[in-house]
Amino acid sequence: ASDVYKRQIRDNTISNQGGGIFATRKATVNICGGTISNNTAAEGGGIYATQNSTVNIEDGEISCNTAAEGGGIYATGTS
């Protein structure tokens, strides 16, 4: 598992998936507090999660992310 505790993930740009966080292939990401903002991607500007990944979010802010699909969060086949 990857833990993100009261961090800022911001101002990232990528041409495909997951401008801020990319979770795939049964990954587990735990987010507690912090900010995910101003990230850009084709899918999942803030968070991209797929292929049986789990993203747990407690508190914090996801804002001002940009993507063609899923500006804040793009999730498919996840929990």
Image (cartoon, rainbow, N blue to C red):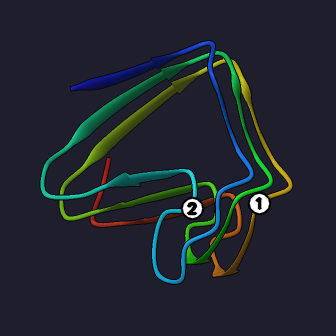
Image location (x, y in percent) of residue 22: 39, 55
Residue at 56% in and 51% down: 20
Residue at 21% in and 26% down: 1
Residue matched to label 1:
65
Marks 1 & 2, CB-CB < 8 Å contact: yes
In 3D space, how far apart are the residues under numbered discs 1 and 2 (Cα atoms)?
8 Å
Element under disc 2: loop
Give the vertical position of 27 relative to 76 (above or below). Answer: above
Q: Is residue 30 left or right of residue 73?
A: left
Image location (x, y in percent) of residue 43: 54, 77
The residue sitting at the right extreme is: 64
Name the N-terminal-most of marks 1 and 2. Answer: 2
Give the vertical position of 35 relative to 12 (above or below). Answer: above
How crowded pointer 1 is (Cα within 10 Å; few <14, some 14-19, many 20+) is rated as many
On the image, which quarter does residue 8 sit in? top right
Residue at 48% in and 63% down: 18
Image location (x, y in percent) of residue 12: 65, 57
Q: Is residue 49 left or right of residue 16?
A: left
Residue at 45% in and 73% down: 17
Residue matched to label 2:
19
Pick the residue in front: 65 or 26: 65
Q: Is residue 64 left or right of residue 5?
A: right
